[in-house]
Image (cartoon, helix red, strand yellow):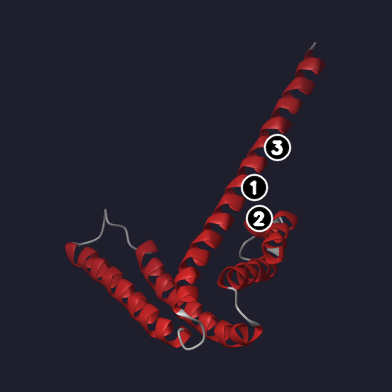
Amino acid sequence: MRTIFLLLGLLIIYPSFSQDSTSPEARQKIQAARIALITERLGLTPDQAEKFWPVYREFSEKRRDTRHEFMRARRNHDPKTATEEQNQRLLKMGLEAKQRELNLEKEYSERLLRVIDSQQLVSLKKAEDDFRQMILRRIDHQRNMRERRQEMRKRNQDQIEKRRGN
């Protein structure tokens, strides 16, 4: 429970989550919050955590690389101007990326089950999804706050201009 409060504190204290999520500092903060949440949710013992995190990081990196490879191809693809062959190639590439990701999940599930039990492994997916949703909600909240501040500044500026005009 203490770790959950730590995580929430990190999300509240560090507004840089959405402002510059590509900066190394922001990524470190996000990673620290992810580690805290997953460790808490899985109830990892110190011994388990020592063995779990290197395997999980390796899996996460490979999964991210697989996703980014396909995202790059998709970003450079315009279906309106692409040929049928190019569209087919992109569809095939997407299916292959999904298959590679599934294969990674199978391989790393087996490896992780040597470190954690099946209940913890099932909880891992839920913890990952919950963390992603927390980050998205935080980013959305900060974007809304930024928009509200901009609207208030505009209203204030409009009021100042009205007073000057009177």
Mark 2, secondary structure of its residue: helix
Seen from the viewer's position, the closer of residues 109 and 27 is 109
* Mark found first going from the N terminus, 1 or 3: 1
- Using the rendered view, name the quadrant where residue 86 is placed: bottom left
Seen from the viewer's position, the closer of residues 92 and 46 is 46
Q: Is residue 109 left or right of residue 94?
A: right
Q: Between tags 1 and 3, which lies in front?
A: 1
Q: Which mark is residue 149?
A: 3
Seen from the viewer's position, the closer of residues 161 and 27 is 27
Q: Quadrant of the N terminus?
A: bottom right
Q: Residue at x 28, y 75 (%)?
A: 96
* Mark found first going from the N terminus, 2 or 1: 2
Residue under numbered circle 1: 142
Mark 1, secondary structure of its residue: helix
Residue under numbered circle 2: 19
Residue at the extreme left: 84
